[in-house]
Image (spheres, grey):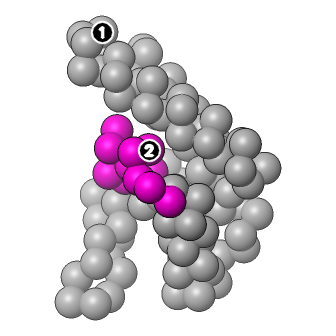
Amino acid sequence: NILDKDHEWVMIDPQGIIGELCYEMSAFLYNPVVILLEHDNLVGLILHRFDRLQKEFGFDRQRMIAWSFVRSVLAACYYEEDNQDEQDEKTRGYFLHFAQFIERNFL
């Protein structure tokens, strides 16, 4: 998770995954979960987030795009595997839709 604390980016709550930092920033892109897809200018918002992450951390844009797609699909798989109630189904669908959004607009 990446948070804004006193105008600085702070990463918290690491999971047991070791890999490149670019993977972790993808959660920042798809939050807030479910309601983000309702944003009036979602392409512009995501482009702004890519620009900010590129500027602040020096991440490669294409790697951010690719990891965003992969992590969204992975999150949908986690929800499919572990959760079966109606709210979890909505969240799983959100992650699939976000992955499709990334694919359509950036891949």
Q: Amino acid at mark 2?
A: Leu
Q: Nearer the viewer, mark 1 or mark 2?
A: 2
Count residues near mark 1 (Cα–Cα under 10 Å), then give few for <14, some for 14-19, many for 20+: few
Does residue 72 show up magenta in the picture? no
Q: Amino acid at mark 1?
A: Gln
**Pick the front one: 40 or 101:** 40
Is 69 displayed left or right of 79 in the figure?
Answer: right
The spot of residue 12 in percent (x, y) is: 29, 65
Is 39 positioned to the left or the right of 84 in the image? Answer: right
Residue wearing tag 1: 84
* Stretch in magenta: 30-41
Question: Where is the N terminus found, in terms of image quarters?
Answer: bottom left
- Closest to the observer, 40 or 3: 40
* Place of residue 105 in the rendered image (x, y in percent of width and height, measured from the top left): 71, 50
- Identity of the residue drawn at 32% across and 88% down: 8
**Residue occupying the point 29% across, 21% down:** 88
Q: Position of residue 92 (x, y in %)?
A: 42, 24
Q: Which mark is residue 37?
A: 2
Residue 33 visible (yes or no): no
**CA distance for labels 1 and 2:** 22 Å
State the residue lying farthest toward the front.
40
Compare marks 1 and 2 and give the one earlier in the sequence. Answer: 2
Quarter-wise, where is residue 79 in the image?
A: top left
Inspect this view and state whether residue 93 appears. yes
